[in-house]
Amino acid sequence: MTVLLAFATVLTATILWHEPAAADDRACLSQDQRRAAIQGRKAVPLGRAIRAAKARQAGDVLDARLCRQDKRLVYVLTVLARDGKVVHLRVDAGSGAFIEN
């Protein structure tokens, strides 16, 4: 029963996260653009951003996007926290530092 509840929570969060994101897709980078940003040292690798986020919020990363926000690149991570809540964390892609909300 707990597994079913966790699955339902993840599914709901994924649907809710992706529907409004359609308008934000223009601000997020494509796979080729992400590669170029990392190779050009404009963004840290995703693994480093995930480690920064996990240092602040334990849980499983469900989704990761590299987006332009406020004239900088930011990783937007969707995390399923250990308490079952879905949270959205931001990491500065240029420095790899966690961004407080």
Image (cartoon, rainbow, N blue to C red):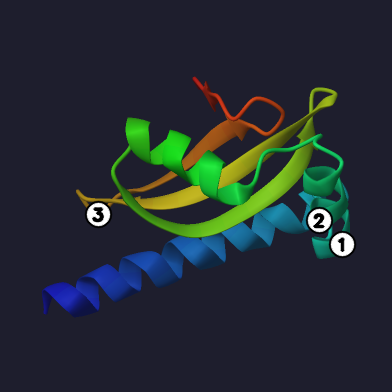
> What residue appears at the point 63 percent right and 61 percent down from the top-left corner?
18
Is there a contact, CB below 8 Å, between mark 1 and mark 2?
yes
Distance, label 1 to label 2, CA atoms, is 5 Å
Amino acid type, mark 3: Gly
Q: Quadrant of the N terminus?
A: bottom left
Is there a contact, CB below 8 Å, between mark 1 and mark 3?
no
Question: Which of 51/77 is in front?
Answer: 51
Q: Is residue 87 left or right of residue 92?
A: left
Amino acid type, mark 1: Asp
Q: Position of residue 31 (x, y in %)?
A: 80, 63
On the image, numbered disc 1 is attached to which residue? Answer: 32
Tell me the element at label 2.
helix
Q: Is residue 2 left or right of residue 81?
A: left
> What residue appears at the point 43 percent right and 41 percent down from the top-left corner?
51
Q: Position of residue 6 (x, y in %)?
A: 25, 69
Q: Which circle marks residue 48 in the picture? A: none
Distance, label 3 to label 2, CA atoms, is 32 Å
Amino acid type, mark 2: Arg
Distance, label 1 to label 3, CA atoms, is 33 Å
On the image, numbered disc 2 is attached to which residue? Answer: 35
Give the quarter of the image for residue 75: top right
Q: Is residue 38 left or right of residue 49?
A: right
On the image, numbered disc 3 is attached to which residue? Answer: 84
- Between label 3 and label 2, give the one nearer the viewer: 2
Q: Position of residue 64 (x, y in %)?
A: 59, 54
Does label 1 or label 3 sit earlier along the sequence? 1
Does label 3 or label 2 sit earlier along the sequence? 2
Outermost residue to the left:
1
